[in-house]
Amino acid sequence: MNEPTDAVTRPQVDRPRTGLLAEFEQVYRAEVGRITAFFARRSREPHTVADLTSETFVEAMTSYASFDPKKGTARGWLFTIARRVYARHCEQAAHRRDAARRDAGRRVLDTDQIAELVARIDAERPGRELIERLAALSAVDRAAVELVDLAGLTPQEAATALAVPAGTLRVRLFRARARLRRKEHDNG
Amino acid sequence: MGNFEDELWTDLLRAHGDGLATAQRPAPLRSRTRPLALTAGAAGVVGVGTVLALTLTATTSVPAYAVTENSDGTVTVTLHDISGVTGINAKLAALGVRARAVTPRPDCTEVEHPDPTHRMVNANTDPLAVASNAAQGKVVIQPRAIPVGDTLVLTAKDFGHGSVVFGVGLVLDPAPSCEKQDLQPPIISTEIPSGMAVASPIPTS
């Protein structure tokens, strides 16, 4: 039998980070706010925001070794995961049993964390309103505006997240912004 | 970062930090012409004899995994992509099922202890079986049949091209979070006929 090693007995939280873990920590710290905001624009419920953010980073962390920085930025890759997590959430929410099961496995939040997330959700109200104003646009146009103008992705990163060519993304972004401006103008 | 984000990071580190600390980005894929196979090492936890192996073909349009609670108390686990292993564990934990999905890694240092006393786990017709393949590409777990002090380990092996294979075995607690990948001869994954072992050697000719 192998003797227990330091890697087994000493919690990772207490050790200096190296390799891909160190790299991922930088990604996490740089992007967790954006990902939380992404979900805060989609839900007014703190637990849902917490769960979806958590699910996104669990998926990201466990597949980070397969992320190829040569093919795009970590931000674009993370938003690809976040969009997939949210799509799955919407699909499951349509089924009552799944929703009940999800409630049973929810992340436990203390009152400070709930207050923190409620503040995030409130802060994203303008973003939610903008998304609602873009409701008439196609899903890709809407997502392009959100990812670039609200989430801070570059057009290239947004193209990666939406799985469309960068040129297509730029055209759609230009078109969506123009429509938004026209609508704002028409509304006075 | 806020309190929530700090605590989430601590939880992530605790659950997955060891795996990522020792992980490496894979070398560019070479074309693979061998049949989909499960190495004996990948099924190392199945030391007591039986392998439940399922081959799934992943597509980009399906979720990486699914964990479904059935009306008869069983739980169906489906894995389409290796990235779904953590999600499976989160769902199993949420459901209170003492089962854990792991991936084999050459650098895994955790020690597993297969349960030597328990009869083997998969049998389609045996109501006491711990797990069975009720349908193509799905493992059905009977949570109540998992002995106290044991954990059902689902070893997920990714062969690339969207193909994932499961090995299933009972281990004494605490269950490992990864599995040592060794170089023993591979075994072909096949369907389970009726509660029998499903591993057979790949022909050498």
Image (tube, coloured by chain):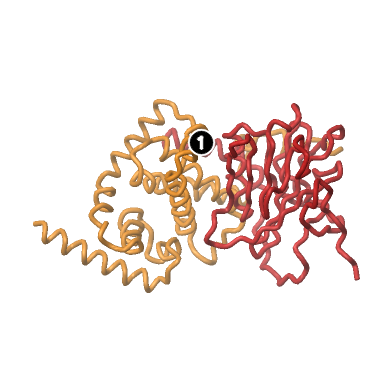
Chain colours: A orange, B red
Q: Quadrant of residue A138?
A: bottom left
Q: Nearer the viewer, residue B192 or B152?
A: B192
Name the residue at the left extreme: A188
Instruction: Tell which subunit mark 1 falls on.
Output: A
Q: Does any portion of residue B200 appear in the rendered image?
A: yes
- How far across and how far down the image is residue A180, in percent? 21, 61
Q: Nearer the viewer, residue B129 or A87?
A: B129
For image coordinates 75% across by 45% down, the residue present is B124
Does residue A153 lie above or below A166 as drawn? above
Q: Secondary structure at mark 1?
A: helix
For image coordinates 60% across by 58% down, the residue present is A66
For image coordinates 45% across by 43% down, the residue present is A95
- Neighbour tally class for label 1: few under 14, some 14-19, many 20 plus, Cα within 10 Å: some
- How far across and how far down the image is residue A55, in percent? 51, 44
- How far across and how far down the image is residue A175, in percent? 26, 69
Q: Does any portion of residue A5 appear in the rendered image?
A: no
Q: Which residue is mark 1?
A: A101
Quadrant where the N terminus of chain B lies?
top left
Q: Quadrant of residue B131?
A: top right
Name the residue at the front extreme: B125
Type of amino acid at the residue the image marks with label 1:
Arg
Q: Nearer the viewer, residue A175 or B196?
A: B196
| Side of B49 relative to B145 (left or right) | right
- How far across and how far down the image is residue B136, in percent? 68, 55
Quadrant where the C terminus of chain B lies?
bottom right
Q: Quadrant of residue B29?
A: bottom right
State the count of labels: 1
